[in-house]
Image: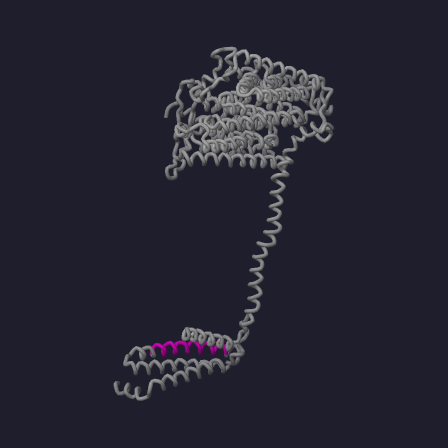
């Protein structure tokens, strides 16, 4: 276990931060720019995992287990969210025959 | 509880139970039953008052019943307490005695009216409040009675509520009385502020050390007198009383002649220990009374409505009572209340009998020659007229003469003015009498055949009141005729310090009497010459050619003056606030708020375009802004 942590620490912390920030931004861009709802979902997952990566990195550097524990919670919530979200997607597809988010514009004003 | 206390409670509560019974069950009771109830509850009260009176002598001590503590706040404690003393005794006799007679009379007078049962309910209610007024041991209980009689007066003036003029008259009476009541309340608050008690007895003890002419007390008593002005129809608050004649005639007799309007005099007599300390207020009362007595008497000269003449006569006589109070002769003021109650109730009831016989005709121009057709009404009315004119040995002579004697002792000039007022009284009353009962009938011939004397329920009270009008004056025989003849002064002596008109000898007093009686006889002769033959018939106000008489017939246009001074400006202000401030400014602000919200939301709702992308972008930008804000600041 300690060895693993050592290996994590081989890469400087800045790199982790830059990587996860990049991943997070890619996720945000994906949500904002893509119109396919399935891809938007995947982008959300990407944002979550970017955060998870940061948690793990900080946890290793600080030599504290809390960050890793928190990652598990994030994963659980993400799994639950995906279950609901995919359910919604299935219903949208059945009603609209598409997963394009532009098709969902009737709820306004 | 002793017997006397129980009797006082019976006296107080009998009319209340009658009122409750009649007002709650009134609709389902047959008229005859309601009338019997109405009359008998007051009769019970009268019997109780009589029994109480028989146990009372000049020496008996006052007693007080404390039912419960009404409210207490801080050091102030107000009890629901009632007090019985010599003054209360006499007032109770007048209220319940004349009250019973008028209830009996109403049984005949109101027999055909659809509101018959309601009428008796209100009348009982009135008597209850009037008894509360004169028995209240503190000013708060008295004030409750005071307002209660005002309420009943309002209800009974507007009794025929389908006629809107009557409703307006009722409202006028109510509003005018409220103006006076404001003064009364101010006076009460001033007293309680300084002396910390509402109780009459405690108040009397509290002011024992106060110097005569104390400025604070003078203001307080002046305020109290403003209350009395409203209730007892003195200048400038008298205009409601003539309009109050819109009510049924028994109401005019009971409330607006014999009892309620004398409440102002009662107030002053009851608190005489305050007024005697404030000579300035007494002078004020004297001049107001004098002005009212003369002013109302002149209006009475040119009125054609039989009840209006009597109403102005009442205002004028109330003025005389205040003259007596103003000279400091409190017992004399009460003496005139006492005699006036009998003969004015008699005159009103007599007028009611005439009105009843003529099927609600009140205009004297269409009366005349009723002497033969209504013999009992005629003879009793004549007695009442002589009594009010002040011819010996009828009741009015004694009380009026005592007032004049007190006034002469104070200032012979004022005596002359008051004498003029009493002569005018004699003139207009005999004018009324001749126009109604002498000459020939001036109504249409069809109705002439239907004129008939009233039923016994109406004539019996007339007869009893006529008898009282003859003998009531004998309770106050002046010292000129009999050294110890003044029973009233003796009876009230313990309560009210009686002062004799000092400074004038018996010879002067006799001369004064001679002058006034001769002058009254001359007035009667003039009235007979002008109106006695039935040749001169008064014209309506519009046809009057003499400008002064026109002014009198128009009641000096006081109503118009008040309308111009108070009502019109008030309406103008209301219009200004209603049409401009409220409709434009207030509504404008409220509507502007509404349309602002509408416009803004109309613009903002366009953001809500239904595209998920837009919402997500807005959220992201928002989050970034929040983070940026946190980072920067």
Q: Which residues are magenta?
A: A72-92
Relative image position of residue A87 (x, y in whole percent): 45, 77
Of residues B383 and B249, the one drawn nearer to the viewer in this rendering: B383
**For the C terminus of chain B, which image quadrant?**
bottom left
Relative image position of residue B218 (x, y in whole percent): 47, 31
Is B450 left, or right, of B240 in this rendering?
right
Of residues B517 and B33, the one drawn nearer to the viewer in this rendering: B517
Picture residue at 43% right of the left edge, 75% below the top = B628
Picture residue at 56% right of the left edge, 36% below the top = B174
Colouring mode (rainbow / by chain / secondary structure / one colour): one colour
Of residues A12 and B150, the one drawn nearer to the viewer in this rendering: A12
- For the stretch drawn in magenta, what is the main secondary structure? helix
Q: In the rendered image, is residue B53 in sight?
A: yes
Q: In the rendered image, is residue B97 in sight?
A: no
Is B309 left, or right, of B34 in this rendering?
right
Residue reaching furthest left?
A2
> Residue B289 sits in which quadrant?
top right
Q: Is residue B534 above or below residue B201?
A: above
Asked if the stretch drawn in magenta spans residue B371, the answer is no
Relative image position of residue B261 (x, y in whole percent): 54, 28
> Residue B598 sits in which quadrant?
bottom right
| Total marks in image | 0
Picture residue at 28% right of the left edge, 85% below the top = A5
**For the N terminus of chain B, which image quadrant?**
top left
Relative image position of residue B301 (x, y in whole percent): 66, 24
Q: Is residue B517 above or below residue A61?
A: above
Of residues B50 and B27, the one drawn nearer to the viewer in this rendering: B50
């Amino acid at each position: 276990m300690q060895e693993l942590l050592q290996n994590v620490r081989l890469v400087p912390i800045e790199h982790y931060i830059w990587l996860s920030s990049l991943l997070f931004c890619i996720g945000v861009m994906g949500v904002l720019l893509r119109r396919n709802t399935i891809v938007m979902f995947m982008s959300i997952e990407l944002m979550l995992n970017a955060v998870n990566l940061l948690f793990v990195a900080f946890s290793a550097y600080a030599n504290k287990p809390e960050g890793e524990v928190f990652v598990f919670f994030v994963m659980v919530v993400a799994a639950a969210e995906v279950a609901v979200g995919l359910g919604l997607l299935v219903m949208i597809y059945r009603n609209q025959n598409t997963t394009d988010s532009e098709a969902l514009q009737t709820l306004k004003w | 509880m002793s017997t006397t206390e129980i009797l006082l409670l019976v006296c107080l509560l009998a009319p209340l139970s009658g009122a409750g019974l009649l007002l709650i069950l009134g609709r389902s009771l047959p008229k005859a039953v309601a009338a019997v109830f109405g009359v008998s509850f007051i009769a019970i009260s009268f019997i109780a008052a009589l029994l109480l009176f028989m146990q009372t002598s000049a020496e008996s001590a006052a007693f007080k019943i404390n039912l419960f503590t009404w409210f207490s706040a801080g050091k102030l404690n107000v009890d629901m307490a009632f007090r019985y003393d010599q003054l209360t005794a006499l007032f109770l006799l007048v209220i319940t005695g004349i009250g019973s007679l008028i209830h009996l009379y109403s049984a005949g007078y109101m027999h055909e009216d659809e509101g018959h049962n309601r009428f008796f309910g209100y009348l009982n209610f009135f008597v209850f409040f009037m008894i509360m007024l004169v028995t209240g041991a503190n000013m708060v209980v008295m004030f409750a009675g005071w307002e209660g009689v005002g309420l009943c007066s309002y209800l009974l003036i507007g009794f025929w509520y389908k006629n809107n003029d009557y409703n307006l008259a009722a409202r006028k009476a109510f509003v005018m009385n409220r103006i006076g009541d404001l003064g009364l309340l101010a006076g009460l608050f001033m007293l309680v502020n300084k002396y910390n008690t509402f109780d009459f007895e405690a108040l009397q003890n509290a002011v024992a050390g106060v110097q005569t002419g104390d400025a604070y007390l003078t203001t307080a008593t002046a305020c109290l007198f403003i209350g009395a002005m409203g209730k007892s129809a003195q200048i400038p608050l008298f205009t409601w009383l003539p309009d109050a004649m819109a009510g049924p005639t028994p109401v005019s007799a009971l409330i607006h002649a014999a009892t309620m309007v004398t409440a102002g005099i009662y107030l002053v007599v009851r608190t005489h220990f305050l007024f005697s300390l404030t000579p300035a207020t007494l002078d004020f009362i004297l001049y107001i009374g004098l002005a009212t007595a003369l002013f109302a008497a002149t209006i009475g000269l040119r009125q054609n409505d039989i009840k209006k003449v009597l109403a102005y006569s009442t205002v004028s006589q109330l003025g005389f009572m205040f003259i007596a109070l103003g000279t400091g002769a409190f017992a004399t003021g009460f003496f005139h209340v006492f005699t006036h109650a009998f003969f004015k109730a008699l005159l009103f009831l007599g007028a009611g009998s005439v009105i009843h016989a003529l099927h609600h005709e009140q205009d004297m121009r269409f009366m005349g020659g009723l002497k033969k057709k209504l013999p009992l009404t005629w003879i009793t009315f004549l007695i009442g007229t002589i009594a009010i004119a002040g011819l010996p040995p009828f009741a009015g002579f004694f009380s009026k003469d005592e007032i004049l004697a007190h006034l002469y002792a104070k200032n012979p000039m004022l005596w002359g003015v008051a004498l003029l007022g009493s002569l005018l009284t004699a003139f207009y009353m005999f004018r009324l009498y001749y126009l109604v009962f002498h000459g020939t009938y001036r109504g249409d011939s069809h109705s002439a055949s239907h004129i008939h004397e009233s039923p016994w329920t109406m004539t019996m009270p007339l007869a009893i009141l006529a008898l009282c009008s003859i003998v009531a004056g004998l309770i106050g025989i002046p010292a000129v005729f009999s050294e110890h003849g003044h029973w009233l002064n003796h009876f009230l002596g313990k309560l009210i310090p009686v002062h004799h008109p000092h400074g004038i000898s018996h010879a002067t007093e006799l001369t004064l009497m001679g002058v006034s009686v001769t002058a009254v006889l001359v007035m009667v002769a003039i009235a007979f010459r002008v109106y006695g033959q039935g040749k001169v018939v008064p014209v309506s106000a519009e046809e009057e050619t003499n400008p002064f008489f026109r002014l009198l017939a128009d009641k000096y246009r006081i109503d118009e003056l008040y309308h111009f001074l108070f009502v019109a400006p008030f309406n103008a202000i209301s219009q200004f606030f209603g049409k401009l401030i409220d409709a434009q400014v207030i509504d404008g602000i409220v509507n502007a708020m509404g349309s602002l919200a509408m416009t803004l939301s109309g613009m903002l709702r366009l953001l809500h375009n239904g595209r998920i992308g837009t919402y997500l972008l807005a959220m992201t930008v928002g989050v970034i802004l929040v983070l940026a804000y946190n980072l920067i600041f």
